[in-house]
Amino acid sequence: MQPTASESPVLSQLAGSAQKELTNILDWWSEKMPDHENGGFYGRIDGTGVLHPTADKNVILNTRILWTFSAAARRMGMHTYRDVADRAYRYLLDYFCDHEHGGVYWTLDYKGQPVQDKKQVYAQSFALYALSEYYLLTYEPEVLAKALRLFELMERHSLDKMRLGYFEAFSRDWQLIADLRLSDKDANEAKTMNTHLHVLEAYANLYRAAPTPQVESALKAMILLFLDKFIDPQTAHLRLFFDENWNLKSDEISFGHDIEASWLLCEAAEVLGNKSLIKKANLAAVQIAEATLREGIDPKDGGLFYTATPHEGITNPNKDWWPQAEAVLGFLNAWKIDGSPHFLQAAQRSWRFIAENLLDQAQGEWYWALKPDGRPDTWNDKAGPWKCPYHNGRACMEIMQYATIREV
């Protein structure tokens, strides 16, 4: 399809706003976060803008910085972004990488010494995602070799070869551990949608960099797993927590993960180039976007609620920054697939919500959330292990890409 005369100005306006905001985001992180005394990046700036220079350094923050600045440098050709990506890559190799057992540590202290040396598969996935992107920027053979080595470790240790899927967490030497959780709010279950979503994302990006038969097979299996296990065909919501035998352990709905998965699944199928899987992924994506729009969007302001359950309705009415960023992309993707104007309108409204409620005009970057009382959340971090430039930076880059569409 081609954008209509009425849709083209909407796309152009979105792209212009996104490009401006991307510059703001990247400039903030480039200025505020490099740790020039101890290397790498600071571990935390709190929600009031105060730097905590001795906060621990988490691998999720480092790898998300690496992915974001590699992607920005690759797409925009800015040497200053390449410098930040180089810094993130060097610190990842020198400090987060376990040179004895392979993989990446979870947390370091501010001087770079391991604090938590567990191998969370979620973290291995982000390291792989970032290394693949950095390779696409640099085309350095050693970078690709490290990415493929990490892929091989994940396939050897984490893949459930009998029942499929990936186990969540391991000790430093790749033994399964009892506490599998990413955070205290997660269920302690063997297989989670969230980790698998980022394995999918990482494998898709690795396939861009290295379209080997092994990566192709693993990526195809991940797409099929989402279509078969994670997406509920009755509700078009994502099932979140399973035991090792794929028994469902939660009925919680995470609207941000739903809409994020919708477009990442399509992207993975497109990267693979499998027409049958593309068709199935597109159908699922539109269904997920419809359910998100119907059940998760606050009609008062266009923001996306955080969680719900079938029996309780909305259980967390906060409107966190990252689901709003993913909502823009999920709705744009659904519009790209079937051309329904209400999806483009929903994407536009989601972006307007971000602009009006989440951009910190005084200190820069985005607030963690808009709270139910209408105030921005300044209690949670502005930057930290779970507040990185990945969701909002990626959203801006993808919005800019949609504006180049002529036929989709």
Image (cartoon, rainbow, N blue to C red):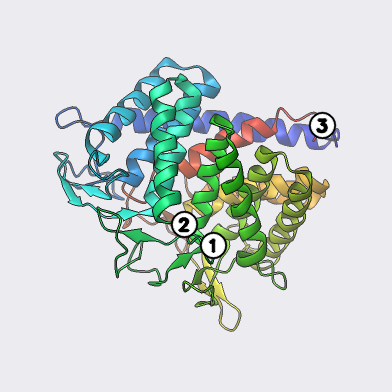
Task: Please state the horizontal and vertical placement of residue 266, each as a whole percent of the image.
Answer: 68, 47
Label 1 SS: loop
Q: Quadrant of the N terminus?
A: top right
Give residue 165's position: percent from left, percent from top. 52, 61
Q: Is residue 112 above or below residue 340?
A: above
Q: CA distance from mark 3 to mark 1?
A: 37 Å
> Residue at left 27%, top 47%?
105
Q: Is residue 243 above or below residue 296?
A: below
Of mark 2 and mark 3, the one earlier in the sequence is 2
Determine the residue positioned at 61% across, 53% down: 221
Callout 3, which amino acid?
Answer: Glu
Name the kind of residue labelled 1 in the image.
Answer: Leu
**Which is nearer the eye, 266 or 22?**
266
- Reading the image, the residue beneath label 3 is 407
Residue 159 numbered tag: 2
For residue 283, side relative to residue 240 (left or right): right
Which one is in front in this view, the residue at disc 2 or the one at disc 3?
2
Observer-nearest residue: 34 or 125? 125
Give residue 308's quadrant in the image: bottom right
Where residue 65 appears, as percent x and y from the top left, is 38, 36
103 horizontally vs 357: left or right: left
Q: On screen, 39 above or below 53?
A: above
Instruction: Count neighbours of disc 3 (C-alpha within 10 A) and say few if under 14, some if 14 to 19, many if 20 or more.
Output: few
Residue at 47% x, 57% y is 159
* Of the image marks 3 and 1, the number of the one nearer the N terminus: 1
